[in-house]
Image: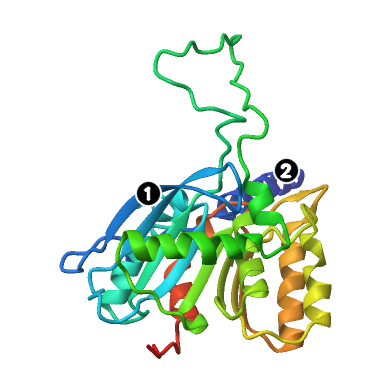
Amino acid sequence: MLQKFLAMALLTSICLTVQAADDYKLGPDSERHEGVPQGKVEKFSWKSEIFKGTERDCWVYIPSQYDGKHPAALMVFQDGSGYESEKGSWRVPVVCDNLIHKKEMPIAVCIFINPGNDPDKNPPAKPGDPKPELKPGEKPKKKPGASNRSFEYDTLSDQYARFLMEEIIPEVTKRFNVKLTEDPEGRAIGGLSSGAICAFTVAWQRPDSFRKVISSIGSFTNIRGGGAYPDMIRKADKKPIRVALQDGSNDLQNQAGKWFEANTAMAAVFKEKGYDHQFVTGDGGHTPKQGGSILPETLRWIWRDYKPKD
């Protein structure tokens, strides 16, 4: 009888643990409310010269409070389609509408950027093209070389920063006739997974242009050398960067490393060097659930003392 009770208790414990992992919900700041002005989101496509041969979709959020007279703050998000959607885990336009309305963050234009795709290596299907014949249960195979995501996001160089500074930001200001602050304290960049290490790399390479980083389940692992960051940060002079880190204890573990340990190492070196940072942990896996649930608080924290200089 005792053995049966213990077995049932163990099973219950396991079930509760499984249910608890990644059980994060969006709060009221991620929902639409009557009386809150809504900004507009516009989509455009971009062919890059810096990432030669790639094409990508981008979106721009312009808050209703932007008057065209004063430069707006700026936020950039990698894997943009996931961040601009109002039905996903992030819902950035909704969160920004609510926080700007409550004056809990500055009037900010957001740029959402998808990773590049090389259409010559993987041309999209055209209407009328025959579909590949698949066996029962077989999934279509993704053609190699289509996405430029890992190269753009995981590479520790200034190429993505130049892509933003020389191509995307000038295009946004011209195409949508918006003024964006040139104060690096008024510019934030964020992403999840490889998009998160990309965000940090931009600020690390160009703190004269971006000084605020939002990193969710960041891939600070050895995909393209990202595991070297803690030692690099330790050996370098301190840079004027503010970093919001988030990760879950059940994040990925594979040949590239252990994601939670890597993020913990990043937080440790930030503390050692005196960086302005926070590290929010949970029990989640490699998903955006926790990052999305805390996004309003993350934005309040990242922008907490910002005062426009323009």
**What percent of the width, then of the height, locates residue 225?**
80, 58
Res. 133 image quadrant: top right
At 20% from the left edge and 68% from the top edge, which residue is drawn?
A: 37
Q: CA distance from mark 2 to mark 1?
A: 67 Å
Q: Residues within 10 Å of mark 2 (few under 14, many from 20)?
A: few
The first of marks 2 and 1 along the sequence is: 2
Instruction: Say which element carries label 1.
Output: strand
**What percent of the width, then of the height, locates residue 161?**
60, 65
Relative side of 303 to 203, left or right: left
Label 1 belongs to which residue? Answer: 44
The number of callouts visible is 2
The relative height of residue 251 versus residue 126 in the rendered view (above or below) is: below
Q: Amino acid at mark 1?
A: Phe
Which mark lies nearer to you, 2 or 1?
A: 1
Out of 6 and 52, give the one closest to the viewer: 52
Instruction: Say which element carries label 2.
Output: loop
Res. 68 image quadrant: bottom left
Disc 2 and disc 1 in contact, CB within 8 angstroms: no
In what quadrant of the picture does the N terminus appear?
A: top right
The relative height of residue 144 versus residue 140 in the rendered view (above or below) is: below
Tag of residue 69: none
Label 2 belongs to which residue? Answer: 1
In what quadrant of the picture does the C terminus appear?
A: bottom left
Q: Residues within 10 Å of mark 1 (few under 14, many from 20)?
A: few
Q: Is residue 281 visible?
A: no
Q: Amino acid at mark 2?
A: Met
Q: Is residue 43 visible?
A: yes
**Image colouring:** rainbow
**What percent of the width, then of the height, locates residue 73?**
40, 77
**What percent of the width, then of the height, locates residue 129?**
46, 14
Out of 20 and 66, give the one closest to the viewer: 66
